[in-house]
Amino acid sequence: MIRQVEHSGNAPIIPRSMHEAEAIPFTASQLRGERLLVLAPHPDDEVIGCGGLLAQHTREGRKVRAVVATDGTEAIASADRADYGRRREEECSRGLAVVGIADVDFLRFPDRHLEARGGELRDRLREALQSFHPDLILVPSPIEIHPDHLALASEFCTLIQSDEALFAELAVAQIAFYEVSQPLRPNTLVDITDVAGVKWEAIAAHASQLEIRDYVAFARGLNAFRSMTLPSSVQYAEAYYTLPLASLRTQPFSALQHAVGDARGALSVEREPLPISVIVRTKDRPALLREALQSIRATGYPAEVLVVNDGGATPDCGTGVKLVQHESPRGRSRAMNSGVEAAANPFIAFLDDDDIYYPPHLDVLSRAAVASPVAACYADAVSAFVHIGESGTMETTARLRLFGDDYDRDLLLIDNYIPLPTLLVRRDDFLALGGFDPQFDLFEDWDFLIRLSGRGTFVHVPRITCEIRHVQAGTSITLAAPEGSTAFREAKLKVWRKHQTLLDPNVFANAFERQKDRLGTANSDVVEQRGRAHHLEISVERFERDKADLLAKLQALHEDAVRNVTRMRELEGFQGGAQAALDRAAHEISEKSVALARLEEEHAAATAGRRDMQTTIQALYAEIRRLQSMLDMIYASRTWKLHNMIEKVRSRG
């Protein structure tokens, strides 16, 4: 029974308000690497986007290399492109020389064609990364508008996700996505005020581009704007979104775009969508089904969605979903067959209710199907191990890269490495092959893929676009029959027995030899990585020792600083006391100066009085001498003598 479901749908999700400090940094960071590699889509993007950071690195004596992907000649007539390309490379070399960089690789891919040359681009990037071994990699933002910018970011992420050996070599590296033509939402702001002039000069070296637009003014304005949330001393800043390389291993490109900023506008491309129907199997797991359907809607792709309910309670599927209802359980294979039979579109994608798509999933597969009309296209998936948390929500305990191998039919005959949700097939092929074999309730998709591989090759798109979820305490058939169990082994033997005519010795020999080569390469990589790990351990021990010495010196310097500060404070205290004493002395001197002035006046008056007294005394002495002379004259006279005799006579009588 099939019917169109027209429910009101789920209540809208209200986003949590983001605190401003979560949206943009309010302090500048020192973004540094000992070996910095900058990947530029065109000549000039490297200095426009991160010229300040490059200048800081070279000024400090750090190793820096630039890789420029395209020749930047799209706007030039074919006859003049060679000369123009040489001119742009010369300008790029001069601009990099201004910031102190002489090591630059020009890959010379045609401008605006990076996406079409993705495989070649990944090979060249791998060479650059392996030869330089950077610990800081600058990459264009994943939400850049220009197709070459977007392709370079996308192919870099694909390379890291698909090449385990390369990832092992660069596992400790840090990635910094930078902005050129589309502002991103940064988690790192770098103060470039001290090298801003150098950056403007480096951009100005691209004279051919300044003839078109004033990129110096654009960069100056953007870098000035980026300083808005930083202290007033910061005049110019560059914005980056940074994360460790390991985060890219299990992160879909769409999730990265969402973290850096809304990229829907940058991804919109006018083209006729491939008609796809998505078949979803479910039974009595409404919460999981709701998440699966939400993930399909989040792709924004105009796909037909059919939910096959295999005998469970009627689910609420929301609007725009066809419900194929089985009144009683018919099994996983028949459930999928019912959905495909009811589908209206010529291409079929698959999803079980416990798995989810990432936003680019259907778009990526549809592009691959249009570009390569083969039997099937498949992308990569992340395996997520989840359980129901105490709050009732799904909590992921681990995320692993278990699926991501290139197509190998011999290996497919021996083991399945293509999860069903990663697949896109033609409906006619599915029906012509009889769909899923009802005899299988486990590995029904593997059995179908073996039969489908007889119709042609598969195209592998090495991008993570969906998530295979292993829900503990759920009803997952793979968890009910885990690898190594009797049921798992029996189901696998059942597939081999069905296709035993295909499993000749050559198949096993080919698969074994390829796996042996892969294992040998992996073992070599492991040995090499162990050697590097040992070397790193020794280096870490040396660094720890140097760190301890530096800490001891730092402690000594700190103690000296404390003593100097204490002495300075003592001197400041002494200076304060001395100043007070000086103030008191000055006051006393002032008072004594007044007293001295009075004393001087008194002294002057006393001196004048003494002179008057001396004059008087001299006059008195002169008078005394005169009187004495008179007395002497009297005493010497006869009269005084006669008088003296009379007085003696009187005294006797």
Image (cartoon, rainbow, N blue to C red):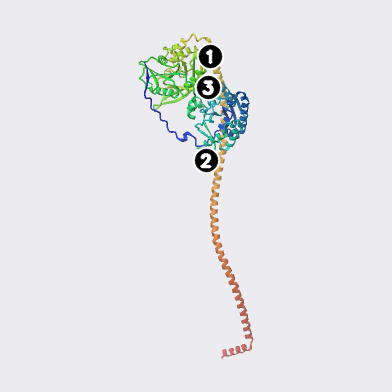
At mark 1, the secondary structure is helix
Mark number, residue 539: none
The image shows residue 341 at horizontal and vertical percentages of 41, 14
Q: Is residue 192 left or right of residue 470?
A: right
Q: Is residue 65 visible?
A: yes
Q: Between 428 and 438, which is closer to the camera in this rendering?
A: 428
- Closer to viewer: mark 1 or mark 2: 2
Which residue position is annotated with label 1? 512
Disc 3: CA contacts within 10 A as few (<14), some (14-19) or many (>=20)? many
Q: Could you tell me how far apart the alpha carbons at marks 1 and 2 are, in whole angstroms?
A: 65 Å
The image shows residue 638 at horizontal and vertical percentages of 63, 89
Disc 1: CA contacts within 10 A as few (<14), some (14-19) or many (>=20)? some
Residue type of the residue flagged with mark 3: Ser
Which residue position is annotated with label 3? 162
Can you tell which quarter of the image residue 60 is in?
Answer: top right
> Which is nearer the N-term, disc 1 or disc 3?
3
Above or below, 496 against 625 in this view is above
Please name the residue shown 43% across and 33% down the image: 17
Which residue position is annotated with label 2? 232
